[in-house]
Amino acid sequence: MIVPKSVFAHYMVGLTLNQTTDQWKRDIRSASAASIDGFALNIGAADHFTFSSLHTAYEAASTFANFSLFLSFDFSASGPDGWTVDYIANLTNSFKDEPAQFKIDGKPLVSTFEGVDFRESWREVRKKVEGDIVFVPDWSSVGPEGVRERVGDIDGAFSFDAWPRPSQSQLTTFSDDGYLSALSSSSISPNSKTTSQNNNNKIYMMGISPYFYTRLSSYHKNWYSPSDTLWPTRLSQALSLNHASSGGGGGGAGAPDLLQIITWNDFAESHYISDLVPSQILSEAESYVNGFDHGGFRAVLPWYVAAYKLGKTTAEEGLADGEWPEEKLGDGVMVAWYRTTPVNVTAATDGKECGDGGTKWGQQGEKSAREAVERDVVNVLAIVRRDTQVVVSVESTGKRVVRQVKKMGGASFFQVGFEELGLGRGNKKGGKVRIEMNGEVREGREVRDECPASGVINFNAATVYIAKSTHPYTGNDDGGSASSGSAGSGSGSGSKDGKGDGDEDGDENAAMPGRSVGVTAALVAFLGFALFNL
C-alpha cells in the first residue's frame, strides 16, 4: 500500500451535539494552520446525533483543499446494543465517497477505539462496504503481542499507548517497537489470496499526546500522567522511529506511517490542543479546564510535521533553510506550559490543607499524583530560524531567565524551576509567567502558592506562546485555503441551554451540554438519521 505520511488529530464527535458548520470550519482552519492533515472522527454507537454531526463535519471539510477525515468507531462507547455489522457498514458507505474522506489505495481508512471482541465481524463489514476498507484499529488493550496474534485480520495497528503508566515518569518507545515488530510478522492478508510479508503492506499509526489529567468522579476517572516533558518527548520519538524512509505502508520496517494526536478536543482529559469550546467542556471538568489554554502545544507542530515528513530522525537535526515552513513558523516559535499551583502548595485561605483531590499517578495507579511531580517547573520549547535570545520572566518578582537558542538547531527544550522565577511555596503574591522572543512578549496565567477555589490541586497546564500563528485570524468562516487560518483563531462558544445525551466511553467519549438547534438543522438531522436507519 502507498501511504502518504500524514498527521491526524483524534476528534471527539460525541461532544458536538448541534455543532454548527462554522465551528467545524474554525476547528479545521486551526488544525490546518498547525500542519494537521485531518481529523480521526471518534464516534459512539449510542449517540443519536452521530449521522448529522458527521454530515456537518464532512460538509465543512469539503470546503478545504487539503483536509481529510476518517471514521474511528469507539467500542467503549457502544451503548446497550453496541455496534453492528450493518450499522458500521452503512456509516462507512455513507461517507466513503465524500471529497474529504481519507483513502489509501482508493479505499477509506477505518479505525477504532478498542473493539477486539468484534474483530471477526470486520470480515462481514468488508463485504458490505463497496470497494472494501483499509482497517487500522486501536486494540491497545491486548498490546503488541495480542495484535501479533490477530495481525491477519487487520491492515495495520493504531496505538493508544501515548502516556506514562502508573509510577512511570517517562514514556519510552517500548510499546511502539512491539507494534512494529508485530506488524512485520508473516501472515495471510485478509485482502489477499497469497502469503505476504506484512512489512510491505501493514500500516503503523502512532499515537502522540501532549498531556493527561482528568478528575471526573461521575465517570470514576481521576489520574494524572507525568506530562511536563511528554509533548517534546513523544514528538521526538515519532522522529526517532522515522528511519525507514517514507510512504510505503512499511510500518513493520520501522517507521510510523501515520501519526495521530490524542486529542483535538477531549477537554475533560486535558489532552486537548484545540482552542477552548465552552459547549464541549463537561461541567464537572470546568474547574480544571476553563482558562487553561492549550493552543501553544499545536504552535510547534508545523516544525515537527515538516521534520517527520522529510524523514528527519532527531529533534536536534533541524531543517535546512529551504525546508523551513516560513508561512507557518515565520522566524520561529516559543511555547511555555506549566501548572499554576505548586504541587506542595501551602494551606488554603480557610486553614484547610490543599489536597490532591484523590488524583493518582497514572490510570489505575496507587500513588498520589503529587509523587509524579519531581519539581514545579515552567517547560519551554523554542524553535528558531536564526540565533535568538529567549527569556522567561515574572514581572512581579523581577526574576528573569535568559537562554540563547541556535538557528536551525532543531527543537530546544528546557525547564525553569519555579524557584528561579521567585515563585513557589511561600509566595502567595504570585506572578504571571512571561515569555519573550524576537521583540514580542506574551504573558500567561498567574502562578500562586494558594489553593484553587476547588480546594484541590489543579494538575492541568496552561500554555503561553509566541508564533506567527499567534495573531488572530481576521477572515471569515467560509472555508477557503487551509493555510490561511491561524493556530490561535477563535474558539467557539455557545449557551448550555440544551442537554446532549452523549455517552461515557471509558477513557474517551462523554456526555456534553449542547447548544439549542435551529428548526432547519433539526429537520435535516432528523431526516438524515431516519433515512440512514431505514
Image (cartoon, rainbow, N blue to C red):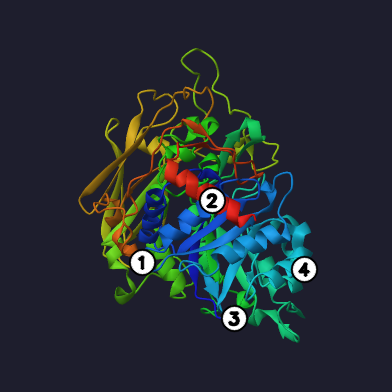
Counting residues from the start of the chain, the first of labels 3 and 1 encountered is 3
Q: Are marks 4 and 2 in contact (CB under 8 Å)?
A: no
Circle 4 Cα neighbour tier, 10 Å, few/some/many (<14 / 14–19 / ≥20): some
Q: Secondary structure at mark 3?
A: loop
Q: Nearer the viewer, mark 2 or mark 1?
A: 2
Q: CA distance from mark 2 to mark 1?
A: 55 Å
The first of marks 4 and 2 along the sequence is 4
Type of amino acid at the residue the image marks with label 4:
Arg
Closer to the camera: disc 4 or disc 2?
2
- Mark 1 is on which residue type? Gly
**CA gap, disc 3 to disc 2?**
38 Å
Locate the N terminus and report the quarter of the image it occupies. bottom right
- Residue beneath label 2, please? 527
Sequence-wise, the earlier of marks 3 and 2 is 3
Camera-side residue: 335 or 283? 283
Q: Are marks 2 and 1 in contact (CB under 8 Å)?
A: no
**Which of the numbered marks, if any, corresponds to residue 150?**
4
For disc 1, the marked residue is 409
Query: Looking at the rendering, which quadrant does residue 95 occupy?
Result: bottom right
CA neighbours of label 2 inside 10 A, class few (<14), some (14 to 19), many (20+): few
Q: Nearer the viewer, mark 3 or mark 2?
A: 2
Q: Kindly check if marks 1 and 4 are in contact, taking CB atoms under 8 A apart as contact.
A: no
Q: Earlier in the sequence, mark 4 or mark 3?
A: 3
Q: Is residue 455 left or right of residue 35?
A: right
